[in-house]
Image: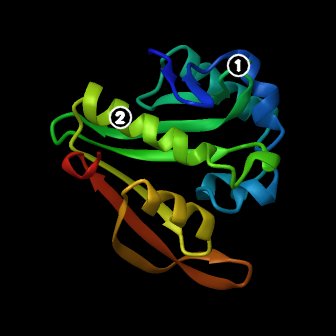
Amino acid sequence: MPHLIGERIILREYRMEDVPAIRKWVNDEEITDTLSDVFSFPQSYENTESFVRSMVEGKTDTKGFIISEKETLDYIGQIDLFKLDWRNRSATIGIVIGRKELLGKGYGREALRLIQQFAFKTLNLHRLELQVIDYNERGYRCYTSCGFKEEGRQRQRIFYKGQYRDMIMMSILSHEFN
């Protein structure tokens, strides 16, 4: 895959050298509590290494990028396109900023803009979608600022810290991206 170059970041390929950086957040509840249920359980070193190896070797349908610092290519996070549907020209986005000190600094927004440009202009996709849990206010603000619109909610879909929370479905269409 090509590198996608932004102002402060580069979206680059996965590398086996990324495993230690991913291991720093993969079992950290401050990062994982807004991610999928996969992270409800501890992730072993072997799980992480296997995932990265599958991305490096292209043995998965997921197409993804490491979000890296522009100058050093050091790991910041990940952004992936999965559930690619070539017939209907759609995909689902998953994103994580794995370095706590960089949360809320606009890196996720910049990565989303780059992946939207790539998905709509290079891959000729028509629709991108994602899900966000209702307590993830920072993520929700980021997604709306990148043009995603709320489509609906799965009411009380997620059980989190003793209560049920809504899962919000969001999307953006190619003609809505500017």
Please give the name of the residue rendered at 37% of the width and 40% of the height, measured from the top-left corner. Answer: 116
Regarding mark 1 in the picture, which secondary structure is present there? loop
Q: Which residue is mark 1?
A: 71
- Image colouring: rainbow
Residue 113's disc number: none
> Could you say which is closer to the camera, residue 72 or residue 18?
72
Pointer 1 or 2: first along the chain: 1
Q: Residue flagged by tag 1: what amino acid is it?
A: Glu
Where, by quadrant of the figure, is residue 107 drawn? top right
Count of picture labels = 2
In the image, is residue 90 above or below residue 173?
above
In the image, is residue 167 above or below residue 85?
below
Q: Which residue is mark 2?
A: 117
Judge the density around disc 1: few (<14), some (14-19), many (≥20) Cα neighbours within 10 Å.
few
Left or right? Give the position of 105 relative to 166. Answer: right
> Could you say which is closer to the camera, residue 67 or residue 40?
67
Q: Nearer the viewer, mark 1 or mark 2?
A: 1
Please give the name of the residue rendered at 43% of the width and 63% of the height, measured from the top-left corner. Answer: 144
Regarding mark 2 in the picture, which secondary structure is present there? helix
CB contact under 8 Å: marks 1 and 2 = no
> Could you say which is closer to the camera, residue 51 or residue 102?
102
Q: Residue flagged by tag 2: what amino acid is it?
A: Gln
Please give the name of the residue rendered at 72% of the width and 52% of the height, measured from the top-left corner. Answer: 103
Per the model, the C-alpha gap separating discs 1 and 2 is: 21 Å
Left or right? Give the position of 144 relative to 9. Answer: left
Left or right? Give the position of 44 relative to 172. Answer: right
